[in-house]
Image: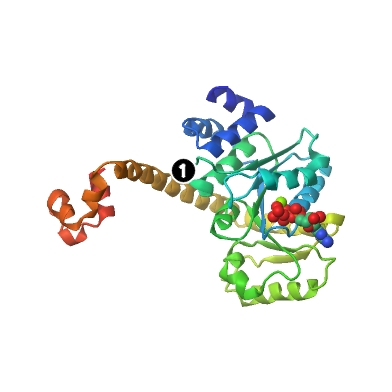
């Protein structure tokens, strides 16, 4: 399939073409810009929901339940599972496949796991590109599951319109959570495994953390809901919290602003990626060591009228290229 065929296939909602497009994102294929260019005009219709949280808290189980609800409303849904901790997602995918089994034969459900084998921009770029592919393929709702709550996961989470942070009873304390930056990314906290001991304490911890968090007037206050994903309990509450956040975003024009902010971050990442690629190739030759040596910098490269002390390597590089 050449890139034009992939583009037209994705736009027709063809699953094979969509899978191919996600692989291109994953691999950081050379013709990725053509792909995204072809798809971009047809995006903006899907609503994306990120699910993040520590391993095993029940993200996939919850996603499977959300898929059920979306399908009962006759909307199409795509699920993207991302494991930023490993370049290959085989293991995680297997578990997810099992949990998603009931949906596997539904043509309106697209399930895919993704790694970022060759993508220069890593997840920060790959995730929004993959979301764009799924959006263009006609998915109404896109669920993005990521494992963990580190920096990479935070980046992925910000690719979504609404971010759910899934926790389970006994899950760390509030200080741990705020350190990891969870509070900033959570639009909704889901305390899953609410059938377990300690659910009240966890619920209170999170409420306390939210109460302490600084929020300007009119800022969104994260919702906290409970669920027992394996039994399909509390799912309506999760859906209601998502809907409330979505309405809040839309009423204020904040959805559009959020998406624009994300696009700006992406542009920055693309520029940085290109710069990194250039520096990478510099490294293979003798230019970089020469640039790095302060004496070399000043003598060889100080551009017209620039004071030598301003000639940091980055500045030098920028003025050279
Ligand atoms: N008791 C209980 N078990 C649950 C609940 N939700 C999920 N589980 C179980 O917890 C385990 C992990 O569930 P997953 O849905 O795979 O969790 P996950 O967060 O997607 O896991 P990773 O993708 O590996 O990070 C499975 O054995 C589930 O059956 C729940 O509400 N209550
Ligand atoms: Mg999972």
In the picture shown, does residue 8 fall above or below 50? above
Please state which of residues 73 and 121 is positioned toward the viewer in this rendering: 121
- Image quarter (top left, top right, bottom left or bottom right) of the N terminus: top right
Q: Residue at x 61, y 75 (%)?
A: 175
Q: Quadrant of ligand 1?
A: bottom right
Quarter where residue 165 is shown: bottom right
In the picture shown, does residue 234 fall above or below 99? below
Residue 180 picture location, percent across and down: 57, 67
Quarter where residue 17 is shown: top right
Query: Which residue is labeled 1 in the image?
Result: 120
Residue 232 can be seen, yes or no: no
Disc tally is 1
Please state which of residues 50 and 140 is positioned toward the viewer in this rendering: 50
In the picture shown, does residue 178 fall above or below 251? below
Residue 42 picture location, percent across and down: 59, 34
Q: Is 46 on the left-hand or right-hand side of 35?
A: right
How packed mark 1 is, by other alpha carbons closer than 10 Å (few <14, some 14-19, many 20 or more), is many
Q: Secondary structure at mark 1?
A: loop
Q: Residue at x 54, y 59 (%)?
A: 151
Q: Residue at x 67, y 71 (%)?
A: 172
Q: Is 159 on the left-hand or right-hand side of 139?
A: left
């Amino acid at each position: 399939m050449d890139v034009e065929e992939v583009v037209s296939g994705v736009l027709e909602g063809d699953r094979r073409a969509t899978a191919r497009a996600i692989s291109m994102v994953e691999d950081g294929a050379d013709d990725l810009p053509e792909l995204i260019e072809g798809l971009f005009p047809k995006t903006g219709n899907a609503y994306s929901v990120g699910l993040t949280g520590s391993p095993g808290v029940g993200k996939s189980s919850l996603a499977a339940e959300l898929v059920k609800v979306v399908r009962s409303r006759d909307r199409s849904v795509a699920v993207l599972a991302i494991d930023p901790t490993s370049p290959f997602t085989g293991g995680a995918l297997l578990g997810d496949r099992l949990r998603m089994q009931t949906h596997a034969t539904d043509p309106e459900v697209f399930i895919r796991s993704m790694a970022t084998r060759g993508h220069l921009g890593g997840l920060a770029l790959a995730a929004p590109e993959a979301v764009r592919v799924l959006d263009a393929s006609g998915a109404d709702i896109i669920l993005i599951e990521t494992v963990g709550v580190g920096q990479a996961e935070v980046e992925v989470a910000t690719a979504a319109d609404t971010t759910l942070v899934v926790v389970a009873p006994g899950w760390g304390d509030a200080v741990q959570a705020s350190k990891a930056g969870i509070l900033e990314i959570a639009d909704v906290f889901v305390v899953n495994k609410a059938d377990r001991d300690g659910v009240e304490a966890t619920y209170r911890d999170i409420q306390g953390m939210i109460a302490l968090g600084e929020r300007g007037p009119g800022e969104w206050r994260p919702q906290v809901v409970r669920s027992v994903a394996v039994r399909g309990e509390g799912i309506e509450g999760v859906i209601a919290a998502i809907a409330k956040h979505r309405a809040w975003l839309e009423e204020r024009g904040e959805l559009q602003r959020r998406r624009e902010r994300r696009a700006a971050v992406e542009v920055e990442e693309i520029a940085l990626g290109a710069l990194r690629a250039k520096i990478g190739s510099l490294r293979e030759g003798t230019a970089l060591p020469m640039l790095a040596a302060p004496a070399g910098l000043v003598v060889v490269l100080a551009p017209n009228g620039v004071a030598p002390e301003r000639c940091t390597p980055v500045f030098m590089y920028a003025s050279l290229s």
